Image (cartoon, coloured by chain):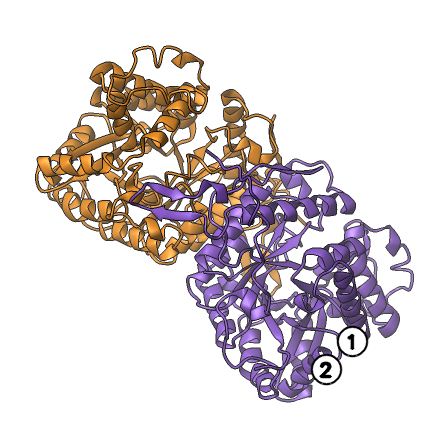
Chain colours: A purple, B orange
Amino acid sequence: MTSRQLSLNAFVYPAGHHEAAWRHPSSGADRIFDVTYYQEIARTAEAGKLDAVFFADGPALQGDVAFNAVGRLEPITLLTAIATATERIGLIATASTTYYEPYNLARLFGSLDHISRGRAGWNVVTTGNDSAAANFGLAAHPSHAQRYARAAEFVDAVTALWDSWEDDAVLLDRSTGRYADRSKIHEIGFAGEHLRVRGPFNQPRPPQGRPVLVQAGASNDGRAFAARHAEAIFTAHQRLADAQAFYSDIRQHAARLGRRPDLVRILPGISPFIAGTETAARDLQREFDGLTVPEYGLRQLERLTGEPAGRLGHLDLDQPVPPDLFADAGDVTDNSRSRLQVVAGIVERERPTVRGLLHRLAGARGHRVVAGTPEQIADTVEEWFTSGAADGFNVMPPSYPTGLEVFVENVVPILRSRGLFREEYTGTTLREHFGLPRPANRFTGVPRAVAGG
Amino acid sequence: MTSRQLSLNAFVYPAGHHEAAWRHPSSGADRIFDVTYYQEIARTAEAGKLDAVFFADGPALQGDVAFNAVGRLEPITLLTAIATATERIGLIATASTTYYEPYNLARLFGSLDHISRGRAGWNVVTTGNDSAAANFGLAAHPSHAQRYARAAEFVDAVTALWDSWEDDAVLLDRSTGRYADRSKIHEIGFAGEHLRVRGPFNQPRPPQGRPVLVQAGASNDGRAFAARHAEAIFTAHQRLADAQAFYSDIRQHAARLGRRPDLVRILPGISPFIAGTETAARDLQREFDGLTVPEYGLRQLERLTGEPAGRLGHLDLDQPVPPDLFADAGDVTDNSRSRLQVVAGIVERERPTVRGLLHRLAGARGHRVVAGTPEQIADTVEEWFTSGAADGFNVMPPSYPTGLEVFVENVVPILRSRGLFREEYTGTTLREHFGLPRPANRFTGVPRAVAGG
């Protein structure tokens, strides 16, 4: 297996990525708080030899629970439970640098990496919705710039904590009574504008050196952050040309920072409706779209465009989207802007009705939705992979668990037969699946270690 | 099984509770970052039908890692991994109200309770060591009073979040598209001096209504907090009379607050050296004591007495403890005072040499150490249980895993034959093991629910 290989993650969303998945009989909406449901999903992904399962997250109830299954288990604990039910698959959790403390989060991910023997990944987010702020005593959500400034310090502090114990710090010399070489366990002495963390860490270095760092922001701050820190980037692009431009931009940016561009895995989202014929696949998509609740979709659109709740209630669902709906798109909170641009682009190109736009957005929250036969899905995966748009994909099945089963059983074998995807795992860690090296420890050779006595 | 029954927890400490456990061949010191080690320990405890496994914690490297295995995995993730390897045993993790945010911690414990189907417990601590402060950007550790004031608000906020979804909030009505009854999902609107949390929570109510609340503080603030909130209390008492006085005090205090005193389980620590004869048990204890490193023990004593590092290095290990060593005991940080009093009491009663005191403290950090045959251990357990000193015990084996195996195989059957301990689990949740009811939801019947739209 010497040729360039795809990375494929299963992006797990409780009932599925389509907004109405919970209503569809193919989804396990009645099991979304049952750990065995997620363990089964992860075993399906592992049977397909996928790189990782990935969970989004936010510390707030987002979206209207009256019409959608928006509650969720906390992903680090959930992935720990998945770790014990699987052997190889990577385990990526989203966690917020705005609403966690570095020492706590370093411990949670460090423990997940120890428990899973090197399969943890951290999707670094600054949290883009303001309902979280009120759950943490803040009157207002910090600004985009403040959040990214804190995020940069946060990642520095957490990765330093993971390096705090050199790999050979533990001596375990029962005869002399020396447990560890204190000169190899380091205070990190991190002192930034937003965060101060002394250390040392209270556990050995994680098996991967550090869990894989993942990032998903598409704003300018997000891109800069990703180019500097991310080892994998989750993106949302509707069109090949946009994805190619992003791919090229990130790799150039990373190279300018002295990083090897091929060590940044760029993984757009893809939400596939799959059936034996293209017509059947489109019918399946229409079946899901037909289950959406317009009241819910309009509220989501209001959030996106910065309108107060109910402001779009007057729109006629069967008339075209008013051309001025996105006129003041520049005034929305900066964290929504990149997604809003994607939506405005759809309206400009496709001139949909309001209902049509709601259906378009219901697919995967702005990610790319495709419908076709397994061969057609494999074709578009291959096209993006071989034309400088992607190193692989974040697979977002419309419904869980069925949508992932269909993908693994029908699309993965085609990709494999084309030599694009592994037959078997060749490594045991997420870093190995992604082809990423284990990082050197920044403290190795630092002469004066200051350890907690 | 109608008679009053003991509660027995396995208090899991990586290599064991004796300070030198990691050097003893009976300990698994080489496996303390291996999840299967803890899963095996939990299965041993479950085979003995114990109530729970319990993990201490603190967000800092505490104690001198040069001479002791003081690193640790984060306990909530670790217990999640244990949950998937067991069926019935309770899972109690320590977590700090000073260094966590309520929304994050409510999610972690709520998820553990969902994942374990109702087996989670939270040992609420305010964190009594000042090395944690520097890991969270604080120049100084908050005062005892400040920490307890925040802790009281923290517990109120977290338990309110767990109540945020009424038990019947989820409708999952696929036909009408109504996922939840929004009038049964509540913002909590918590606004205190230290914390503000709006809610609603982003997951359904935990299976137990709320995880069992445990507390371990023996200071006056700690006792008041325990009498108000705790459903189980972990204590450290050397002598029966002291334990009886504490037991009586807490129950009276709880009764004055309108609580049913029998719904507060009081569980002293006991660290048993067990062998076929009393002599062999004492020899085993001496064997462990002989493995202690005096440099480590003196540093621990310096911390306890508020002396700077090295201040006690001049003491002759084989001379009696100087009578003025604890003279200024009243001046140490208030969080150490109750433990210091225990140590001063030992010195006053037993007049040990310095080495003798270090051995005494090496046993279980101030908890009661006993050595004897299985019958003798069972006798003292029964005596404390039947004389108003304890509702059960936090069992603290000198070494893991061996010490727990010996206890489960040899002492538990005697307690069972005396009708003091269960033959089989009669429930599936930790609340049921402890004989505690599932709490009512504070929001049930609250007419105006404000849900996240």
Q: Measured along the vertical axis of the image, is residue B28 above or below residue A428? A: above
10 Å crowding of disc 1: few (<14), some (14-19), many (20+): some
- Comparing A389 with B124, the one in front is A389
Separation of disc 2 and disc 1 at Cα? 9 Å
Which amino acid lies under the numbered mark 1 shown in the image of this protein? Answer: Leu
Q: Is residue A33 left or right of residue B138?
A: left
Q: Could you tell me residue B418's position as x and y percent?
A: 11, 40
Q: Is residue A193 left or right of residue B385?
A: right
**Image quadrant in which you'd find residue B419:** top left
- Is disc 2 in contact with disc 1, using a CB cutoff of under 8 Å? yes
Per the image, the residue denoted by label 2 is: A383
- Comparing B237 with B148, the one in front is B237
Q: Quick one: SS at disc 1? A: helix
The answer to whether residue B257 is visible is no
Q: Tell which circle, 2 or 1, labels the residue nearer the N-terminal end.
A: 1
Q: Measured along the vertical axis of the image, is residue A84 above or below residue B346? A: below
User: Number of labelled discs?
Assistant: 2
Q: Which residue appears at 52% of the width and 38% of the height?
A: B158
10 Å crowding of disc 2: few (<14), some (14-19), many (20+): some
Label 2 is found on which chain of the structure? A
Q: Measured along the vertical axis of the image, is residue B383 above or below residue A415? A: above
Per the image, the residue denoted by label 1 is: A240
